[in-house]
Amino acid sequence: MRIAADIWPRSSRPIIDFGAAYNSITFHDDDVRAPLPKAQPGLDRILAQQAALTIASAQPALLWQDRFRMVLESAFREDTVSLEHVAQRLAMSPRTLQRRLGEHGTTWREEVEAVRQEHTMELLRATDLPLRSVAARVGYSDMRALRRAVRRWEGRAPRDIRNEAGVAAMPSGADAVEQPPRPPDIGARSVTSSGTASSPRACRP
């Protein structure tokens, strides 16, 4: 469609050509440069600033999968990870939840594994919790299962990940290192079985 106003007298109405090869609108030069009857100088800058503020303060709408991830991560923090619990939080049945995940090209098992991996890496890199505690928090039965999972994800041991992050784990249980007994101080006061302290005896030369 082509609308041409420059080829017609100023007193005539423009002709709309519906058989044109491309879309265009043509104006007289004087019309383009003519000021608007009700123009307000500076209003364009105010409207542009208002539009920028509106865009900056707008909250993007959460997609369904984003909302599901938020609920699943919350279930990990609360130690309530189960298909039934997450489905209830999303106001749907477990079967509907599995179907919705399938529509998004994933499964319940894959999503749980992905969130478990993220949570595990965060605990290893940002905390000094013992591996036994880390395993319990992410749903593993023992540290061996945790170590196998970390090697499958990262190709290295949890200890290597913590060393890289500069985190030293607190020893606990099987992680604890037995310390050798400290030798007694010869000049220290000895404690008897009755709980009273006695002074060390002087040794004759």
Image (cartoon, helix red, strand yellow):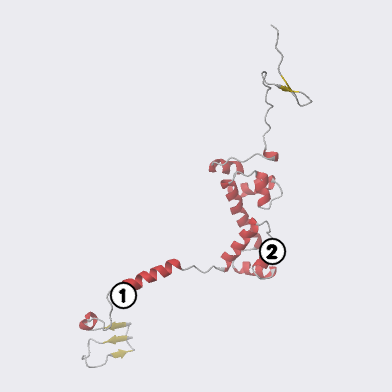
Residue 157 located left or right of residue 52: right
- In this picture, is 94 found above or below 189? below
In which quadrant will I find the C terminus? top right
Location of residue 99 by image quarter:
bottom right
Location of residue 30 by image quarter:
bottom left
> Looking at the image, which residue sits at the far right?
194
Q: Residue at x 65, y 66 (%)?
A: 89
Q: Residue at x 62, y 66 (%)?
A: 101
Structural crowding at the residue carrying mark 1, measured as other residues with C-alpha within 10 Å and reported as few (<14), some (14–19) or many (≥20): few
Cβ–Cβ under 8 Å for marks 2 and 1: no
- In this picture, is 35 found above or below 170? below
In which quadrant will I find the N terminus? bottom left
Mark 2 or 1: the one toward you: 1
Q: Nearer the viewer, residue 86 or 185?
A: 185
Please state the horizontal and vertical placement of residue 155, each as a whole percent of the image: 59, 46
Question: To which residue does mark 2 refer?
Answer: 85
Q: Nearer the viewer, residue 122 or 37?
A: 37
Q: Secondary structure at mark 2?
A: helix
Q: Is residue 157 visible?
A: no
Q: Is residue 74 visible?
A: yes
Q: Secondary structure at mark 1?
A: helix
Structural crowding at the residue carrying mark 2, measured as other residues with C-alpha within 10 Å and reported as few (<14), some (14–19) or many (≥20): some
Q: Earlier in the sequence, mark 2 or mark 1?
A: 1
Q: Nearer the viewer, residue 74 or 28?
A: 74
Q: CA distance from mark 2 to mark 1?
A: 53 Å
For the residue marked with disc 2, what is the amino acid? His
Residue 58 located left or right of residue 85: left
Q: Residue at x 27, y 75 (%)?
A: 41
Question: To which residue does mark 1 refer?
Answer: 43
For the residue marked with disc 1, what is the amino acid? Leu
